[in-house]
Image: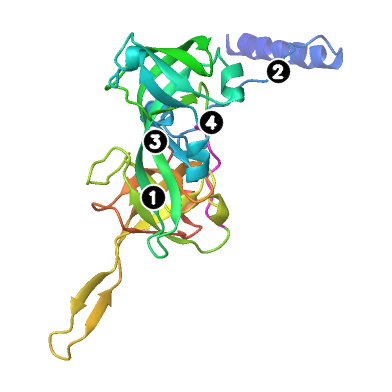
Amino acid sequence: MRVGLGLALVAIVGSVYAAEERDEPREVVHLSPRVRELPPSEATPTIERQTVAPFLNEYRLIDSRATLDDTPYVVAGEEGHQLIGSGDRFYVRAGEDAARSRDVRRVIYRPGTIYHDPDSDALLGIELRAVGEARWVKREGDLDVFEVRKARQEIRPGDRLLPYREEPLSLTFSPHVPDHAVDGAILGVPEGVSYVGRHTIVALDLGRRNDVTPGTVLALDASPVQVSDPLEGGTLHLAGEPGGMAMVFESFERVSYALVMKASRPLEVGDGVSTPERSVLTSFEAR
């Protein structure tokens, strides 16, 4: 039996080698391209759309008073009414360009916070907050008639109209640190909260003039604390402590908006903004 089994094995092996020598057809494996999914640590950091997208039409920034003066504005409601609500019609004084773009969806804004440079007090920008939406109805003489589609609060004379931004920004960025040292501060929190933590949107006194663009990663630091020397007198400045990290998602000439991605301690308006170590990019987590 063992001799017979051995002869059978020899026969099988011999037939395999014989097949290889005859170049018999072999099974062909077809390769095709496919998408390779990267783990979060290797993917490009993104900002969650639901975190930022509502903000993009909720707030706008105007660089100067002259630019604000050129935007269309509410004159009055029908019959001269000063308070206008949902479904009401109202009159708008607009330039020729605005009148020609009648099919554009409009957001009604109210001028709010005015940002100034903390050191020179120079105007950095005027923040606008949405109070409603409107659609164009008709032209009457020198004025345009609009109808309120949505009203978050009563619309008043002097409120401004700007086109709605359908897809204003890409929320996928290539994170980078500034090529040079920057030194700034948190100007404000558009939502009006006093506590600044993770996923809070903040306004910074840095913009395109500082080479701060969408995707710029910045360090957030607590402001230096002033204390009195208990023995020798005089004022001492205690260095600020590292507080977190933020990524800019929209920038203007002198102001930018950033989302706080990391916060190791509570932050507040006036805290510092600076260039982080380049090594932070290797450990910057995708959100």
Please tell me which residue lies in front, 19 or 7: 19
Image quarter in which the C terminus is found: top left
Report if the CB atoms under discs 4 and 3 are less than 8 Å apart.
no
What residue sits right under mark 4 in the picture?
Answer: 170
Q: Amino acid at mark 3?
A: Leu
Query: Can you tell which of label 1 and label 2 is closer to the viewer?
Result: 1
The reply to whether dot 1 and dot 2 touch (C-beta < 8 Å) is: no
CA distance separating discs 2 and 4: 34 Å
Residue 171: image location, x then y, percent: 49, 32
Q: Is residue 88 left or right of residue 107?
A: left
- How many angstroms separate mark 1 from mark 3 (CA)? 11 Å
Tell me the element at label 2: loop
Give the mark toward the camera: 3 or 2. Answer: 3
* Label drawn at residue 115: 1
Q: Position of residue 5 (x, y in %)?
A: 61, 11
- The part of the chain drawn in magenta is 170-178
Q: Position of residue 76 (x, y in %)?
A: 37, 21
Circles 2 and 4: CB atoms closer than 8 Å? no
Task: Report which residue position mark 3 lands on.
Answer: 128
Classify the position of the N terminus by image quarter. Answer: top right
Dot 3: what SS?
A: strand
Neighbour tally class for label 1: few under 14, some 14-19, many 20 plus, Cα within 10 Å? many
Q: Which tag, 3 or 2, sits closer to the chain's start?
A: 2
Q: CA distance from mark 3 to mark 2?
A: 55 Å
Disc on res. 31: 2
* Residue 170 seen by the camera: yes
Q: CA distance from mark 4 to mark 3?
A: 21 Å
